[in-house]
Amino acid sequence: MTGIVDAPPAFTPAKSLLKDGDHSPAQVLATLDLADRLKAQRRAGTETPGLMGKNVALVFEKASTRTRSAFEVALRDQGGAGVYFDSTSSHMGSGESVEDTAKVLGRMFDGIAYRGFDQTDVEQLAEFSGIPVWNALTDQWHPTQALADLMTMRESAARGFGDMSVCFIGDSSDNVARSLMVSAASLGVDVRIASPAGYQPDDRTIAMSEEAAKASGGSVTVTADIDTAIDGVDFLYTDVWLSMGEKESLWEERITALRPYRIDESVIDATRNPHVKFMHCLPSFHDRATTIGRAAFEKYGLDGIEVSDHVFRSDHSIVFEQAENRLHTIKALMIESLSPRSVTGSQA
Ligand code: CP
Ligand code: NVA
């Protein structure tokens, strides 16, 4: 006789995403597959709401264009609702502890998207709220970015992750690089990091990536030698050289250290792959249209900091595909965490 204890679970339990590696490679692939289907449905006008009645708190302590938009539009598309808190409009951190805030949000919302500084804050939100929490960027990790990056790579390459290579160039100690490194390695990608000493990922992240690559059949190379790292690579990836929350006074030393790792046409040529794609999480200082971009030109003669405007706007660039895919992947992530439908396959 099949008793209630023997019955298979109707759906995978709701899951937070606090950092890369929290979800198994199979779960990540399921999220990417669902994101592909949701993208096609949105284009065809056949999307059906899977987040009806779900309320999500969007707690953002740093600025955002893409991530906030992705969460809010995904919720609207799927029949749910988001409540946005910026750094001054909730008590968290100044007038109320993260623990107490988490306990309150957990009683009113179905999920929390959190963008902030230290990773311990997002971990505490998950621990004390009792509801799924998605890391929308901390100083250490940017896992929802990595989901969009992987979706874009698969879409662009039209082949499996085991047959792809990506090289992150620049400040590889930052959140975007670390998330890409662990997530791509766990799906079997040939991951290369090209950064000078002092800007490479920490030993723990390298060890996490190497362990993930060992299990997936991928590989991880960390080197200061850009020419070796980019040889024959499919995707070149970079990010800003100074992340949100870092002191502006660090610009000078960053530009001095990372200038040899700036992506321009000569780097594209040196890959020896005419089809190489350029990736960037955005926002980017690729021209003089921002205050910082203008200052870099006036002070250092750099027209475009981490990447030249020419490469950014070239046919190699897939940066706006990446940006759009933030929406589809974040939508898939929320549906998988909050709705049992996707696990039974009825979402397709
Ligand atoms: N890539 C990214 O996270 O962009 P936003 O800071 O605009 O959300
Ligand atoms: N490394 C950047 C990413 C922005 C999306 C930052 O943290 O500011």
Image: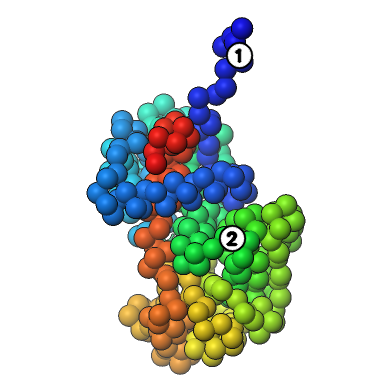
Identify residue for label 1.
5
Q: In which quarter of the image is the N terminus?
A: top right
**Residue at the image point whose x is 59% and y is 86% from the top:** 272
Compared across the picture, whether 12 is left or right of 325 comes to right
**Residue at the image point whose x is 40% and y is 82% from the top:** 314
Inspect the image, locate mark 1, and give the three-letter code of the amino acid beneath it: Val
Question: Please, what secondary structure does the residue beneath circle 2 have?
Answer: helix
Instruction: Please determine whether, in this image, residue 336 is positioned above or below residue 88.
Output: above
Residue 161: which numbered mark, if any?
Answer: 2
Q: Position of residue 42 (x, y in %)?
A: 30, 50
* Disc 2 residue lies near ligand 1 with CB under 8 A: no
Instruction: Please determine whether, in this image, residue 65 is positioned above or below residue 286.
Output: above
Q: Quadrant of the C terminus?
A: top left
Inspect the image, locate mark 2, and give the three-letter code of the amino acid beneath it: Phe
How many residues crowd mark 1 within 10 Å: few (<14), some (14–19), many (20+)? few
Instruction: Please determine whether, in this image, residue 48 is positioned above or below residue 340.
Output: below
